[in-house]
Image (cartoon, helix red, strand yellow):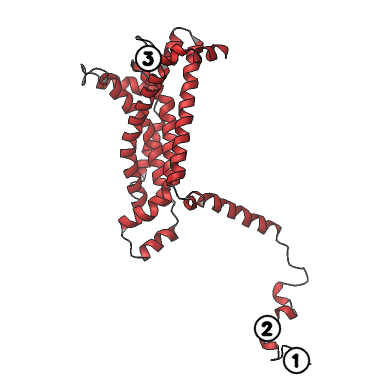
Amino acid sequence: MNDVLLWLNDPQNWTGTRVSPGIVEQAAAHLAYTAIALSIAGVIAFPLGLFLGHTGRASWLVSVANGLRALPTVGLLILLYVMVSPLISGRGDAVYLVPTEIALVLLALPAILANTYAGVRNVPPAVRDAAQGMGMTGRQVLFRVELPNALPLVFSGLRSAALQVIATATIAAYVGLGGLGRYVYDGLASRDFGQMAGGAVLVAALALLVDLVLSLVQRATVSRGVSGRFSRRSTRDSRTAAVTAVRPEPPSGGTDGDRRPTPASAPASALTPSGDRPSG
């Protein structure tokens, strides 16, 4: 632990040298790799998830996308590098950047696609029917009703994808690129465990920071009523279950239907105009 603190508190590690970039520059490169991957994955998965959720067609694509989670990212990166590098050789860092971004995009796709699809499909049917009853077209129902209600799950998928990509973007250093993974691989190669653990701490801190920013964006974008819909539903269900559990049983001598009405519950026709009960 002391080695990690010493490495993090060294000003030269933050500012860098002519030969080695500092932590700030490497963190910026790490964020750039993440932003590129999330942007490409969002452009592909978000419209596709809206279409699949709205129409209910080809839902098997979501299952296929979830299967991409099982791919080993490092092995996929090496395979892509072998396949892509001959096609773009001689173009500088693009030889390493393109395979890395493809691997990160495939990692981010499942979370965004699955959550967007689930968010649209989980819109209450009564809400969708009410919108159609008001004369809305399918396009209006999608963008005015289904999408606003699906935003909490959409943001959840985006945040999950961001955490996965930030944690996995360290593989960029494996093929010679920058990023915070540079400290992890260099520390492992030189047996400098303070640098290696420090790089891991920086990756975790960056992931938490990005997740915090996205949560603030979600809070500012998503309606509070939509955000609390699922929590209110679960709370209401738990209260209903609790009331049902403590409801007293009717007396064994008869049922509720056999009871005579009390004066307070007597029908109005049994009262005289003066409000007194008629005699015998």
Vertical comparison of 273 with 83: above or below: below
Q: Secondary structure at mark 2?
A: loop
Residue occupying the point 45% across, 50% down? 223
- Of callouts 2 and 1, which one flags the residue occurring earlier in the amino acid sequence? 2
| Residue behind mark 1 | 278
For mark 3, give the secondary structure: loop
Q: Are marks 3 and 1 in contact (CB under 8 Å)?
A: no
Circles 2 and 1 in contact, beta carbons < 8 Å = no
Q: Residue furthest top?
A: 190
Q: In front: mark 3 or mark 1? A: 3
> Based on the displayed image, in which of its 4 quarters is residue 67 positioned?
top left
Q: Residue at x 71, y 58 (%)?
A: 246
Q: Is residue 203 visible?
A: yes
Pointer 3 residue: 21
Point out residue 229 in the picture as x, y percentages from the top left corner.
51, 52
Give the amino acid at mark 2: Pro
Reading the image, the residue beneath label 2 is 267
Callout 2 environment at 10 Å: few (<14), some (14 to 19), or many (20+)? few
Indicate the amino acid at tag 1. Pro
Measured in 3D between alpha carbons, the distance from the residue under mark 3 to the one under mark 2, in whole angstroms, is 87 Å
Residue drawn 47% across the image and 21% down it: 202
Indicate the amino acid at tag 3.
Pro
Instruction: Compute the Cα span from label 3 to label 1.
Output: 99 Å
Q: Is residue 94 left or right of residue 185?
A: left
Circle 3 crowding by C-alpha within 10 Å: few under 14, some 14–19, many from 20: some
